[in-house]
Image (cartoon, rainbow, N blue to C red):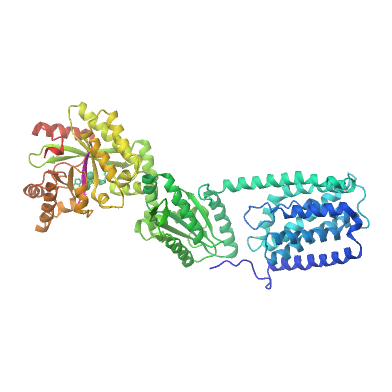
Amino acid sequence: MSVPERPSLLSLSMFSAFWWLSVLGGWALLATAVAKVATSSLTIAGWPLAMTAVLLVVLELLPLVEGRGHDPQGVVMSTAFVCGMLFLWGLWPAVLVVSVAAFASDLNVKKSAWKLLFNVGQYNLSVAAGWLVMLATNHTSSLQHPLAHFAGRDLLWMVGVWIAYFVTNDVLVSGVLAWTDSFLAVVLDDLLHYTMMTFAVLALSPLIVVLAQTAWVVMPLLLIPLVLVYKTAQMSLDKEHQAGHDSLTGLPNRKSLRNALEESLSRARRDQQPFGLLLIDLDHFKEVNDTLGHHVGDQILIHFADRLRASVRDADHVARLGGDEFAVIVSDAEESEVRTLAERIRTSLVDPIAHDGMLFDIEASIGIAMHPEQGHEPDDLMRLADVAMYDAKETRTGIATYAAARDRHSADRLGLLGELRQALDDGDIELHYQPKVAMRDSSLMGMEALIRWEHPQRGYISPDEFIPLAERSGIMPLLTERVIELALGQLSDWRCDGLPVPVAVNVSVSDLAGPRLVELVSAGLRENHLMPGMLQLEITERVVAEDSLNLDSVFRALAKMGVSLSLDDFGTGYSSLLRLQSLPVDEIKIDRAFVSRLADTSDGSGIVQAVIDLAHARGLPAIAEGVETAQEWDVLQSLGCDGAQGWHIAAPMPARAATEWIRERIALTGTVIASAAKF
Ligand code: C2E
Ligand code: MG
Ligand code: MG
């Protein structure tokens, strides 16, 4: 799947036609020029010609001002001198000197032979086109009869020469570049970008004429404006480059990618060639960024960008879209080839990225959208690749091609995220509260806050559906902030009402891995003048079991503050006994799955018994979740379970109903067991 460097010169194409035309025509002109000049002598023209020729060659050796999409002609500063020579001494000296200059400049930058041959020919034909205008307007000059006097009206035919020169040059170059894009597109692109600058340079040619006629010694002064024009052109192209590139990795940015996508689409339509768009997202990058800081995150992105560049072909367009999202346009490729490239990118990450003595195992998820099978517009392709990328993440396959069948699902979820953001802004997120009670006397131990989202159209959406989405999208910190704010507000209200009930809040892995949780909790407690012991954080055991996240310091900071920690969903995470031993938790919640199996089998009660014993061995209370029936309650009681939560006691309820429930329960049992430590 390699893109050929250029079409063949031996088969008929616009490329080969223009190339042969320029080379045969241009080199024939050169041969004639050599013969003609040899029979007269360049020295007749003396120092003025020598000076003009030297300056022409010097300027030609300046690097091209370029930076546009296709291999550009750019703005050539020597053009003013080429025209100056043509005006003064006619066609042959101009052809001779411009050939030497073009040859020297191409050798200097080590251009390939076919380009060198073409460039010399192309210049000569352009000069000849200018010469035809001189012939047509009866203003020929030669070594023997140089242009003697310059009058204002000469400007008229000189402008004609400029136009003929510029247009011929543009058409010839566009003709050979037509295989990279459509002929007309290249012609127009060059006309658009180089006309003003080229004419600014050409406008100096009458001055060259005048100086050569009257004061050739001061001609080098002309270099000053020319070099200034050159610098300005370079600066403006540098600016254009910056606007289209990401400053961290140096890769093209989202804006450039869009332009490149549009170009790829128009090329693909013309050549009937398929191409693919890859969207790449680093897995768990946010956690690295949050725990180790942006500096480390940035270094990893730079390393990744390097590997990405090394994995793709020259013709592919790589871009950074922002954050840890990258994209590649894989040109002229079938889906299987695009997949191969995606695999190559993932393989490039097999070796961990080393930074500052640490090794980072980075993985990426890649979504693929293909043109023309799947998308015909840039926005469509971006969206489809995004859907595929989420698919790759969710199914943990690493690479996924867009599949319409899965789209509705994913698109719904993407839409849901946007709406969740809106719900947070609009205050549509609230908390319901579910009691935890002591099994020995049914007294209240505390209330667990559970997030509730009543969607205006879709109705109730379960946290199990939107919390994982929020976790992945970076919206989770906002959500947790709101939950803690609401829960602490409620705690404070209850305390004012004379109801000192502890409240438990669920926190997720990204909260724990992030930098803000400890600060958020301590500031919230301070603002509401609350004792830290009144707040409990529930952490699911699955998070704790993942040793790779170094969460111990967060746990310790929270425990030190006096906030109580509860190990939620115990039994689902397979954490080791050793790990359990070292955790500063105050309570263990037995997962609902074990409770619901209690009634069915004796195995069920065996496991629950083991968990309760484990908790007690560490001096911790065990609380059963999801207690739905009196039968379950009785079995749990007989097993020595300390607390229970579930529909059998009460379902989660809105704040007002919860307040009523609390009042009734306190009236009934006369107490709140405000601290887990009382067991
Ligand atoms: P969890 O912390 O284990 O919460 C218990 C879940 O069981 C709740 O589901 C609750 O409504 C439900 N439940 C309570 N009693 C019974 C019962 O007797 N039978 C059955 N079948 N279910 C019962 P919910 O509210 O849908 O929450 C699901 C999970 O979402 C929670 O599991 C928790 O992990 C997470 N979550 C809820 N609110 C938040 C929050 O504010 N922040 C975070 N990070 N996670 C939350
Ligand atoms: Mg919970
Ligand atoms: Mg639970």
| Residue 327 image position (x, y, % from top left) | 49, 55
Q: Which of the pair 351/5 is nearer the observer?
A: 351
At 68% from the left and 51% from the top, the residue drawn is 65
Image quadrant of ligand 2 equals top left
Residue 526 location, quadrant: top left
Q: Is residue 412 left or right of residue 195?
A: left
Residue 236 in view here: yes
Using residue 532 as the reference point, say whether residue 217 is left or right of it: right
Tally the numbered discs: 0
Q: Give the left or right position of residue 633, taking residue 245 as reference.
A: left
Q: Is residue 371 visible?
A: no
Residue 361 vertical placement versus 539 (above, below): below
Instruction: Report the magenta residues as a range.
Output: 564-570
Q: Residue furthest front?
A: 357
Residue 310 in the figure: left or right of residue 679: right
Residue at x-position 58% and y-position 56%: 263
Determine which quarter of the picture holds residue 359.
Answer: bottom left
Residue 88 spot, x, y in % from top left:
88, 53
Magenta-colored segment: predominant secondary structure: strand
Q: Is residue 325 magenta?
A: no
Please, which residue is most extreme toward the left here?
Answer: 638
Q: Position of residue 276 (x, y in %)?
A: 50, 61
Q: Percent from the top left, x then y, of residue 679?
A: 11, 40
